[in-house]
Image: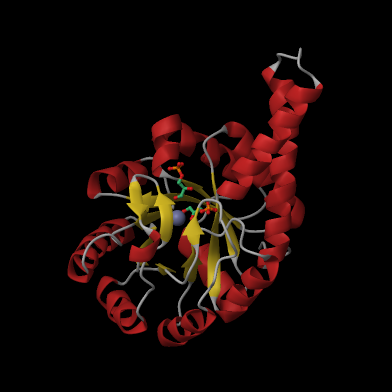
Amino acid sequence: MLVTGKAILKHAHENGYAVGAFNVNTMEQVQAIIEAAEETKSPVIIQASQGGLKYAGVEYIAAMVKTAAEKASVPVALHLDHGTDFKQIMLCLRNGFTSVMIDGSHYELEENIKKTKQIVEMAHAVGVSVEAELGKIGGTEDDISVDEKDATFTDPDEAERFVKETEVDYLAIAVGTAHGPYKGEPKIDFDRIKTIKERLDMPLVLHGSSGVPEESIKKAVSLGINKINIDTDIRMAFHRAVKKFISENPDVYDPRKILGPAKEEMKKVIKEKMIMFGSAEKAW
Ligand code: G3H
Ligand code: 13P
Ligand code: ZN
């Protein structure tokens, strides 16, 4: 069933676990995520990035995820990842997204508050939940490139003011993770997660979560992270399986035979994440 992001994350916040938010561009990814969620009895968030929307088109993404959600026995939210502006978010609302992110993290605080507030008013008017970002998450996110040394962590005082003024439903915080593959091991500021959770008492979001070791993920969840964004690890699973299949079967040209094993490999990774995040058996 298709539900709002808030319904999913309120339950996660109140029960101390995190839900995976997995990026999709293709049908096989949507199916892998839904099958993984059903097999682990996990609520799930399926999200589309800027690149994903450019590649597949908002209508295709929405149609695929809504079809999958309607057939699913677990709660599913359709979320816009790193939304850029009013126009794009309006388009997502029109296409039935149940959650949207407005990423104003590259603006000064006042401008981020102003932009986020505007989106919250609009989305809440039609019952859609909103995620915002405060602080700069390192790495490359869509068209926005944040130099690692420029990346700044979320300030708890600013976070408190930001949430009070914008009335956003969940907040993405910068605590040391980065988008894309890590060169070394990420150094996560766990104390900052704890402080922000105590001050805000609301669902918190971790971006750039691919490649973060299991113990760090579990610790972050125990301190208050409730939405965990995963893209790169699914891309890598896809790549691994396609490469293996083609090298073992160089003459097979049927896309179904090539993509079938890729779907299974992605599903395996997604199921492991759901168990790691604590969302397995939490579907209602
Ligand atoms: O924001 C995170 C995504 O991993 C960016 O992916 O290349 O689909 O825009 P994209
Ligand atoms: P990764 O690609 O590092 O998993 O990041 C995903 C993300 O944060 C999407 O918003
Ligand atoms: Zn992100």
Image coords of residue 174 (percent x, y): 42, 69
Placement of 192 over or under 133, stated as above or below: below
How many numbered marks does the figure carry? Answer: 0
Placement of 105 over or under 250, stated as above or below: below
Which residue reaches farthest right? 248
Q: Give the residue drawn at x 26%, y 57%.
A: 122
Q: Is residue 71 visible?
A: no
Placement of 253 over or under 53, stated as above or below: above
Q: Nearer the viewer, residue 139 or 80?
A: 139
**In this figure, which colouring scheme has been used for the structure?**
secondary structure
Q: Give the residue drawn at x 59%, y 32%.
A: 27
Q: Is residue 248 left or right of residue 176?
A: right
Q: Can residue 3 be seen in this view?
A: yes
Q: Is residue 213 left or right of residue 119?
A: right
Q: Nearer the viewer, residue 251 or 81?
A: 251
Q: Give the residue drawn at x 35%, y 79%.
A: 155
Q: In which quarter of the image is residue 133?
A: bottom left
Placement of 93 over or under 6, stated as above or below: above
Q: Give the residue drawn at x 73%, y 56%.
A: 272
* The C terminus - image quarter: bottom right
Where on the image, by quarter, is ligand 3?
A: bottom left
Image coords of residue 40 (percent x, y): 75, 56
Image coords of residue 239 (percent x, y): 65, 35
Q: Nearer the viewer, residue 181 or 109?
A: 181
